Image (tube, rainbow, N blue to C red):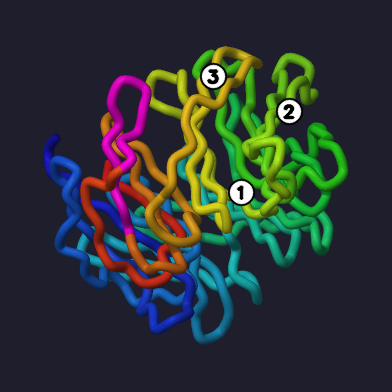
Amino acid sequence: MMKKIGYVGTYDENHSAGIYRFSLENGILSDGSLFAAIKNAKYLKYYQDKLIAIGDFEDGAGLALLDQDGQLLDQPVYEQKTSCFVDAHDHHIYTANYHEGSVSEIMIHENKLRFVQKVIIEEGAGCHQILFYEDLILVPCLLLDEIRIFDQDLNLEGIIRFPPGFGCRHGVLSHDGKWLYVVGELSDQVAVVDLTQWKTVRFYSLLNSTERPYRQSAAIRLSSDGTLLFVSTRGRNTVTILRADGCDLRIIQTLAVQGDHPRDIYLTDDLLLVANRKSNELVTFKLQDGRVAEEPVSRLNLIEGVAIALKE
């Protein structure tokens, strides 16, 4: 495996100083160092050789655009409370704000960011992700038990509804574009959405029959071949691996993350990276033959890690 450069965003708690950079080679983590002093960098996106970060600033909250040396290129402030998710597509950046129940659009051009608009879905909606699907934008609203569907100008096109208490947080698309797999934070379930009908068709619990809900499932990722789903559950401190075949899911492994509070996970072709927020570490596990090795390959101390991005 060639050497890769990665970044971890952190909460502004427990003496975290901002965004940290690390090196990854053959599963070994090294060179952990402060990349940029951005407060509450809750989510990161590596885009067009730049790093886009959510952040809090002296006069409010917004985005930071950083070059590969961590130098600040632009910093628009457009909200009072920090968003929790950012993604970019075709020179447009979109952020989801859990607290405000809003989605914002920002243009990126020649290393400058220009705020375009904000759409308030509903105060307390719990907007938690931006997910691009064809020419649409899907926004899971955790506290509404809905995914709102928008066009790229943020006009509402439709709604996918979930059972009360499901708590849709994040989703990933199947490689054939027919299915959407959604993790329910409050139900510790994965829902399967039929994208030809915009309806939920199956629900799968991440827990065994004797467990009470932890109400803390977080990140969901799909393997590069589209056959495996990985879902982290904080409190339980596990990553659940499910075999995915269309709308049929089957749990094949439950991995103990060897730490506390797996807020984010990230996949390479042969590694699972886990950001254990409360034990202040980034951990790598080996992927092989559809399984994850139970013992970590490497650990790196990183305070309050909540978001992982790798240089593309």
Res 203 label = 2
Q: What's the CA distance linking mark 3 and mark 1?
A: 18 Å
Find out whether residue 244 is within the magenta segment: no
For mark 2, give the secondary structure. Answer: strand
Q: Residue at x 71, y 49 (%)?
A: 213
Q: Main secondary structure of the magenta part?
A: strand
Q: Amino acid at mark 2?
A: Phe
For mark 3, give the secondary structure. Answer: strand
Give the magenta-colored segment's residue range.
Answer: 282-294
**Total numbered labels:** 3
| Left or right: residue 4 compared with residue 82 | left
Q: Which residue is mark 1?
A: 217
Residue 210, percent across and down?
70, 41
Q: Is residue 35 visible?
A: yes
Q: Residue at x 65, y 31 (%)?
A: 136
Q: Is residue 54 above or below residue 145?
A: below
Q: Is residue 243 above or below residue 55?
A: above
Question: Which badge, 3 or 1, is on the more N-terminal residue?
Answer: 1
Residue 221, percent across and down?
48, 36
Splitting the image into 4 quarters, where does residue 48 fall? top left
Q: Amino acid at mark 3?
A: Ala
Q: Amino acid at mark 1?
A: Ser
Question: For this rendering, which residue is in front, 274 or 134?
Answer: 274
Res 244 label = 3
Q: What's the CA distance linking mark 1 and mark 2?
A: 14 Å
